[in-house]
């Protein structure tokens, strides 16, 4: 997993999600991931398939995968 810890102690991780094609897709993925404990920010970009997540600690990839699946998309891994 590719994660980066910044100076304030939060962790930024970029995930690759397949199947997103529009703003609605971005919102669905962002909404599900933002419900995970410790997540403070989610930015999904359909054109690149990248989802940037800022959290208090590294997230369990299985939990992120489940959230993405719930939104109707597939987690391909981290960037």
Image: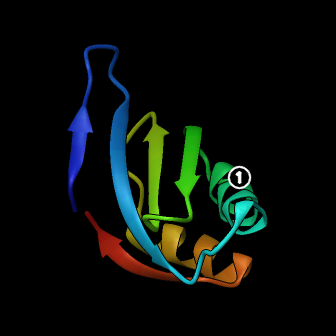
Give the quadrant of residue 62: bottom left
Q: Is residue 76 left or right of residue 3?
A: right
On the rendered image, what quadrant is the C terminus found in? bottom left
The front one of 2 and 37 is 2
Which residue is drawn at the image coordinates 22% and 38% (left, top)?
A: 4
Q: Nearer the viewer, residue 73 or 45?
A: 45
In the image, residue 46 above or below residue 62: above
Q: Does 19 sit above or below residue 30?
A: below
Question: 49 or 55, which lies in front?
Answer: 49
> Can you say whether 26 is above or below 56 in the image?
below
Q: Quadrant of the N terminus?
A: bottom left
* Percent of width and height locating residue 48: 43, 64
Q: Which residue is mark 1?
A: 35
Q: Secondary structure at mark 1?
A: loop
User: Horizontal and vertical percent for residue 47?
Assistant: 50, 65
Q: Position of residue 58 (x, y in %)?
A: 35, 48
Report x, y in % for residue 37: 61, 47
Residue at point 66%, 49% (across, down)? 34
| Quarter where residue 46 is shown | bottom right
Image-based side of 47 in relation to 21, left or right: left
């Amino acid at each position: 997993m590719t994660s980066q810890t910044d100076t304030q102690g939060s962790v930024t991780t970029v995930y690759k999600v397949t199947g997103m094609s529009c703003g609605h897709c971005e919102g669905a993925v962002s909404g599900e991931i933002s419900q995970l404990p410790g997540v403070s920010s989610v930015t999904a970009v359909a054109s690149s398939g990248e989802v940037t997540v800022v959290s208090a600690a590294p997230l369990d990839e299985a939990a992120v995968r489940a959230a993405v699946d719930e939104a109707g998309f597939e987690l391909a891994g981290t960037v």
